[in-house]
Amino acid sequence: MVVGQETEDEMIVPMGNIVIGPPESVEPKRSSVDFPHSRHFASVDCRTCHHTWQGTEIIKSCSTSDCHDVMVSPTKSEQGRANPDLAILYYKTGYHQMCIGCHKEIRIQNKQLEISFKELKETLTIPGPTGCIQCHPKE
Ligand code: HEC
Ligand code: HEC
Ligand code: HEC
């Protein structure tokens, strides 16, 4: 028998809001972001966001090493200017592209549904914020 062995097969899924701030090494310019994690579960699949998740291993933070772990804007570093593939590995671009990209997509779909009268305005999906201050409120 192995005494004191850690069981690591339990993943704690944060319910309610997650406050997303920048990784420790980054000096923040904007306020942290209130992200209603579990509210997204109803309409968005886990793997849309946790896009490398195979369904068995424990989900880690987006800025974990070897994921979106570039902490300096690639447009500001020589290495980054030489290698455009680094862009999405920059943690901020990873977040912005995912969060803002999806919310914008919903806005476009809503507009089309409104124009085509296929759906009542009241029943359209809430698009989620796309403006800076909406996500990073002034402190
Ligand atoms: C849908 C939400 C959302 C919107 C809209 C958004 N951001 Fe962000 N932003 C985030 C998240 C999430 C992060 C990563 C967490 C963090 O670093 O605070 C982030 C990170 C940042 C960072 C790097 C961290 C820092 O504080 O220096 C900056 C700068 C930033 N955003 C500026 C902006 C600006 C400017 C706009 C508008 C053009 C904007 N954001 C719009 C969610 C958003
Ligand atoms: C709309 C996007 C989105 C959806 C959908 C989503 N998540 Fe998340 N989840 C996030 C973000 C963003 C974080 C914060 C990650 C970070 O801190 O870097 C997070 C954090 C987590 C964490 C904590 C990771 C850590 O930092 O330790 C777990 C576990 C998790 N999610 C599981 C799930 C599961 C299971 C589902 C489906 C039921 C799900 N998520 C659906 C975006 C999402
Ligand atoms: C794939 C699509 C998708 C992604 C990715 C996504 N969202 Fe959303 N977001 C939604 C939808 C759909 C809703 C409306 C949920 C509802 O009906 O309650 C929403 C709602 C929200 C709201 C509440 C808006 C309100 O009016 O109350 C916030 C805040 C938000 N999202 C922040 C974020 C942040 C921050 C991220 C990235 C970490 C993110 N979202 C990623 C689809 C997405």
Image (cartoon, rainbow, N blue to C red):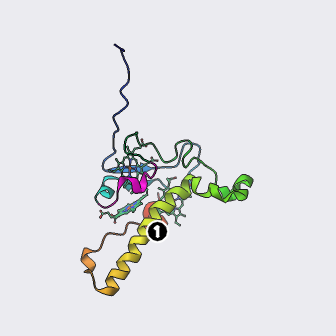
Residue 75 in the image: x percent, y percent?
Answer: 68, 59
Q: Residues within 10 Å of mark 1 (few under 14, many from 20)?
A: few
Instruction: Look at the magenta stretch and give its main secondary structure.
Output: loop
Would you say 84 lies left or right of 127 here? right
| Residue located beneath label 1 in the image | 131
Let me know if residue 47 is in the magenta part: yes
Residue 34 visible within the image: no
- Locate the N terminus by quadrant: top left
Q: Is residue 104 above or below residue 39?
A: below
Relative to the observer, which residue lies in front, 31 or 23?
Answer: 23
**Residue drawn where x is 74% and y is 54% of the image:** 78
Label 1 sits on a secondary structure element that is loop
Let me know if residue 60 is in the magenta part: no
Residue 96 visible within the image: yes
Q: Is residue 74 above or below residue 8?
A: below
Relative to the observer, which residue lies in front, 132 or 78?
Answer: 78
Residue 34 in the image: x percent, y percent?
Answer: 40, 55
Type of the residue with mark 1: Gly
Relative to the observer, which residue lies in front, 89 or 136?
Answer: 89
Q: Ligand 1: does it lie within 8 Å of the C-beta at label 1? A: yes
In magenta, the rendered stretch is: 43-52
Figure quadrant of residue 2? top left
Would you say 88 lies left or right of 116 here? right
Residue 87 in the image: x percent, y percent?
Answer: 61, 58
Residue 15 in the image: x percent, y percent?
Answer: 31, 47
Figure quadrant of residue 14? top left
**Residue drawn where x is 46% and y is 49% of the image:** 52
